[in-house]
Image (tube, grey):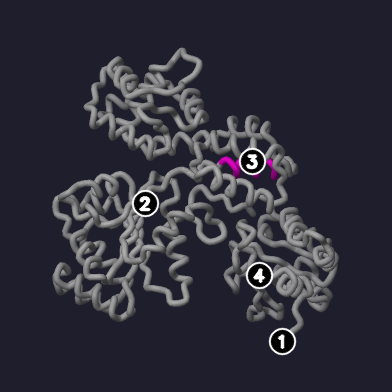
Amino acid sequence: MKEWPPLLDYFKNELGYEVTAEVSSLGYELFYINLSSLKLRLSNRTPVVRVKNADLAGMTPHQLLQSIQDVIREKKWGNQTTMILLEGKSEPLLKYTTGPLYSNLVVIGVEEQERVRQSRRPTGDFMDIISTQIPISLLSPYETTSPVTGSRFFGRELEISRILGNPDTNHLVLGIRRIGKTSLLREIERILRDKENAPHVVYMDCSDLISTDDYVREVVRRLEPRELPRLEMQKYVFYFPNFLERMQLRHKSRLIFILDEIDNLIIFQRGDWELFRMLRASSNKGACQYIIAGFREAQREQYLLDSPMFNFAQSIRLNEFTMQQARDLIITPMENLGIRLKNKDEVVTRIYQETAGHPNLIQYYCMILLRRLDQTGEREITPDSLIDNIYKDEGFRGHLLSSFMENTHNREKAVVYAILLGKQGTSRLGIVSQAFMDASLRKKGITLKQTDLDEACNMLILAGILHRKEKDYSFTSPVFVKMLQQSYDLNHLFSKTKEEGL
């Protein structure tokens, strides 16, 4: 075995990090180090390139960087942070890594490596080196547009435990858009695939599947594409259940289907339900387990006695984060990035209250704060930072309000606008009753049945807009109310909603 770089040897044998050797490329020794425990945008296979003195002597710094970029292309590491461990000084190379072409490179010279090895906080010093070369907003795990898994996945421990602990049960994950349904499903998929005796898992985004044909064809393509011609010749309603049973026998275990964004498929299946009856039959026979995610349509169908989704799955509702989950999401990455939080409890409480614990908004909030620190070069967040930064950020304003618009229908919007219009002129919103909502709606010319008002309130609770305590309601987020009032003419919004129809 070749002698490892001293820093990697120290991280592996003294600190317990997982380090593995990779096949060399263009004459460089390559390694991977597992930095996922830091809960940042650093993976369990963070690439490391060893640059020896002979490499430094044989090329100019610019040529060396070009050579390393070729290694990155060959290994397809383009979007990952890559560590370069030098046997010499880092300064000559650092002069050339300031441009966007090298934004994912971290250069660590021999002196810095020795300083980390002698440090009383080696991981902290190692992260300090990384965060001085890569913007902390890019190193953070916060993601507001795409699903995340592994080291960047936070919270939902109870939901994961319920799903994985009940392998003989189907599960229906319910939640508003951007609450983290897809991330949860992807994390479940990752955990299942990483098991020693991994079951056969099929993840499918069903948002573009609108018919039984679409669904069956996609499943056959995933499990056994050679049978697609047979599918075209034989009516699937007789063929598909038999196909699933054969696939179960082939894989010697129940097939696990993870079906995301199921609502559109439900809409197009209503009145016929051919597909969902087949799914139910395959589950009853023990061939398949289903882990499904949806929102309005899925929630409605699970309670209808004549629906094939009635008693088909145990429902798991994704709500906002608890205070402890929010605290972990805020503090763990910040501290690993070397960010000081002055009056930590107050900072966490303020962020939690202003986002109503919505994980997507918490991440957006934290991302804004880190971007401001990148701009100023500071490494401290105080309660005053929250006031100065978040209320002025147009991106957060748009993100918050668009989440509301996407997650509510006109009836729910009308209830929200009616409450705010009914409270105009008062200093505090406080709590409101359904009687107050009803009276405010009637003043604006709208009368709702009690069942419709109940459903609207329930959806607003699910959407994280309202909170219910016994018979009364209140808004969960003061920031949402303030931004809605500042950004729109509520009378105009109400009129447009009424005009469009409830």
Can you identify the residue that label 1 sits on?
1
Q: Which region shows up in magenta?
A: 365-374
Taking the view exactly as shown, the residue that stands out farthest to the top is 425
Can you identify the residue that label 2 sits on?
316
Can you identify the residue that label 3 sits on?
369
Q: Are marks 1 and 4 in contact (CB under 8 Å)?
A: no
The residue depicted at 34 percent of the width and 37 percent of the height is 459
Determine whether, in the image, residue 422 is placed left or right of residue 343: left
Q: Are marks 3 and 4 in contact (CB under 8 Å)?
A: no
Closer to the chain start, of discs 3 and 2, is: 2
Marks 3/2: CA–CA distance: 32 Å
Of the pair 104 and 445, the residue shown nearer to us: 445
Three-letter code, disc 4: Ile
Can you identify the residue that label 4 sits on?
33
**Residue 39 in view:** yes
* Above or below 309: residue 423: above
Three-letter code, disc 3: Leu
Q: Are marks 3 and 2 in contact (CB under 8 Å)?
A: no
Marks 4/2: CA–CA distance: 36 Å
Closer to the chain start, of discs 4 and 2, is: 4
